[in-house]
Image (cartoon, rainbow, N blue to C red):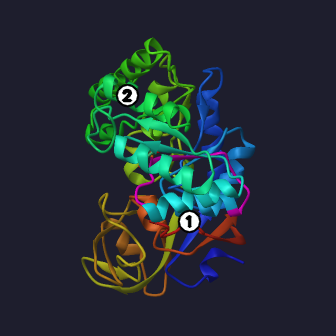
Amino acid sequence: MHPHDLDTPCLLLDLDAVEHNIAAMMAQLEGTGVALRPHFKTPKCPQVAKMQLDAGAIGITVAKLGEAEVLADAGLGPILMANQVVGRLKIDRLMALLARGVDITVAVESEFNVRELAEGAARSGQRPAAIIEVDNGMQRCGTTTPAETVTLARMLVDAGIDYRGIMGYEGHMYGQPEAGPRAELIQGALASVNRHVEALAEAGLAPAIVSTSGSASVGVASHTPGVTDLQAGTYVFHDSHHEAFTPGVYRYALTLLTIVLTVRERYAVCDAGMKSLSADHGPSFSRDGSYKAARLSEEHAHLTGAGIANLRPGDKIELVPSHADTTLNLHDTYHVIRGGEVVDAWPILGARKFK
Ligand SMILES: Cc1ncc(COP(=O)(O)O)c(C=O)c1O
C-alpha cells in the first residue's frame, strides 16, 4: 500500500531512516569503550527497542514505570529507569516487576526515597537496584554535592539495596544554541559528574555505572573518561529541533501524514492540529522546508511559506515534527514504511504511559 492511501492524520515511520540513525549512533561509539542504553521515551515501541538492542545497545533507559512494564512484557532489557520511583503505589509496582524477574535499576536522589525503597523491599522480599542521580547543572532532580551522593550510596549499601552507580543528564545543553559554548557546557556538566565519581571512589564506593547524555552530547560524553554509558533517545527518530544540534548526522524517520483541506492566497490548512502534532519546540516543517505549520488549533494547522503555492485541497503531505517525542505520544500506531510502501503497523505501546 502507498502511504498516501492511509487515512489522516497518522504517523509514518521510515524504517530505512531508523536503521540509518541506529547505525550512525553505533558508529560514533565504536572504539570509545562507552556503551549505549537508548532512551525509550522516544520510540515507546518494543520493535524499535529490539532493533537498538540487536545493533549492540546493552540495555534500554526509560523515564516511567509504565514504559518499563511495556518493555518487561516484551521481554526486553535490562532496564535503567533514569527517574525516581516515588510513593508507595509506584514502589509496589517496581517490586512487582522485580518479582517477575525483570532486571531494572532505578534512580534515587533523596534519603526519603532510599528509605521508601528499603521499606518496599522489606514488604515484598525483593532486592531493588539503584543508581544515584546527580544534578550536573540542569537543575531538575539529583544530588548537588559529592558528599550528598556518598551519603546516599552508603545508605543504599546499608539498606541492602543493589547500588549500581550514578547518572546525570546535561539536558540544559539544549538551551545553548552556539556549538562552542555548548561543548564547554557539556564538558563542565560531565566534569561535575566526575567529581561525584571521585568522591565515591575515595569512599570505597566506586560506581560501576556512570550514565549520562542526550543525543546532542554523545560526541563529547563518549570521549569523557569516567563515563560508562549513554542514555540518548531522540536520535533514533530525530526531529527538526535536534537537527540544529546534530546537523547532518541523523535522518528524519518520523513524519505526520496530513491532508490539505483548503488553500487560500497566503495560507493553506491541513487536518493536523494540536491533538495530533505538538508545537512545544516550535513549528513543524514540510520535508523540503518550503512551508511550515505556523499555527495550530485543535484539529487544524495553518500552513505558510512559498511551498503552499503547489498545494491543492485533498493533497496528502508529510510534516516533520519539531518534537518527535511529544508528537508520537499523541498517537497509537506507527505506519511502517520501507521503500516507499506501507509494510507494517506497530503499536506505540509506551504512548501516554506517564505514570
Ligand atoms: C534523563 C534523560 N536522559 C536522556 C535523555 C535523552 O535525551 P535526547 O532526547 O536528547 O536524546 C533525556 C531526555 O529527555 C532524559 O531526560
Q: Is residue 265 visible?
A: yes
Q: Nearer the viewer, residue 159 or 233?
A: 159
- For mark 1, what is the residue? 350
Question: Residue at left 37%, top 28%?
Answer: 151
As rendered, which of 353 and 38 lies closer to the eye?
A: 353
Is residue 165 visible from the viewing direction of this image? no
- In the figure, is residue 14 to the left or right of 328? right
**Tag 2 secondary structure:** helix
Label 1: how many residues lie within 10 Å, few (<14), some (14-19) or many (20+)?
A: many
At x 28%, y 80%, the residue is 297
Instruction: Specify whether 298 is left or right of 39.
Output: left
Give the vertical position of 193 relative to 163 (above or below).
above
Q: Is residue 86 above or below residue 245?
A: below
Ligand 1 within 8 Å of disc 1? The answer is no
- Looking at the image, which is closer to me, 159 or 189? 159
Amino acid type at circle 1 is: Gly
Q: Check if residue 265 falls in the magenta segment.
A: no
Q: Looking at this rendering, what residue extends furthest in the top direction?
A: 202
- State the image coordinates of residue 2 (x, y, percent, origin top left): 68, 76
Q: Please tell me whether residue 130 is drawn above or below residue 354 in the rendered image.
A: above
Q: Which mark is residue 5?
A: none
Mark 2 Cα shell of 10 Å, populated few (<14), some (14-19), many (≥20): some
- Tell me the quadrant of the picture where the C terminus can be found: bottom left
Please state the horizontal and vertical placement of residue 98, each as a whole percent of the image: 64, 53
Instruction: Name the disc covering residue 151, or none.
Output: 2
Highlighted range, magenta: 73-87
Between the C-alphas of marks 2 and 1, the distance is 34 Å
Q: Is 81 inside the magenta-drawn segment?
A: yes
**Left or right relative to 62: residue 290:** left
Of mark 2 and mark 1, the one earlier in the sequence is: 2
